[in-house]
Image (cartoon, rainbow, N blue to C red):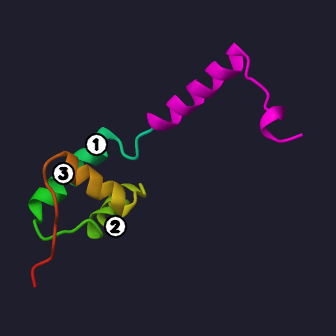
């Protein structure tokens, strides 16, 4: 007997439980609104600060750890795009 024929179907309560769990994971934020404000002010104040340095400053100021990709996505979302140090 193959694995496909042994598939069990979910009851309605199990199916909704899975939907709720997935929804909870998607709505989680990496930073609070105050930390977002700190990132925005820091990025605008120091135009040469890139997405690698911003999480380091946030971690030293608030203790919150976020990835550089999260900061890149956040900068793009608020219209601050790429940050490169001057050569």
Q: Which residue is mark 1?
A: 34
Main SS class of the magenta portion in the image? helix
Q: Secondary structure at mark 2?
A: helix
Residue located at (65% from left, 22% from top): 15
Q: CA distance from mark 3 to mark 1?
A: 10 Å
Residue 74 shows which numbered tag?
none
Q: Position of residue 61 (x, y in %)?
A: 33, 59
Q: Secondary structure at mark 3?
A: helix
Q: 76 or 8, which is in the foreground?
A: 8
Q: 78 or 16, which is in the foreground?
A: 16
Q: Is residue 77 left or right of residue 65?
A: left
Bounds of the magenta span? 1-27
Residue located at (69% from left, 15% from top): 13
Q: Which residue is mark 2?
A: 56
Q: Which residue is mark 3?
A: 40
Let me know if residue 39 is in the magenta part: no
- The residue furthest top is 12
Quarter-of-image position of residue 37: top left
Q: CA distance from mark 1 to mark 2?
A: 16 Å
Q: Quadrant of the C terminus?
A: bottom left
**Marks 3 and 1, the one that precedes in the sequence:** 1
Q: Is residue 16 left or right of residue 86?
A: right
């Amino acid at each position: 007997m193959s694995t496909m024929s042994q598939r069990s179907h979910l009851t309605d309560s199990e199916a909704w439980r899975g939907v709720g769990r997935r929804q909870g994971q998607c709505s989680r934020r990496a930073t609070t609104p105050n930390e977002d404000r700190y990132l925005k002010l820091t990025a605008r104040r120091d135009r040469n600060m890139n997405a690698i340095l911003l999480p380091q400053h946030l971690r030293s100021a608030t203790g919150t750890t976020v990835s550089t990709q999260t900061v890149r996505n956040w900068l793009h979302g608020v219209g601050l795009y790429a940050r490169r140090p001057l050569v």
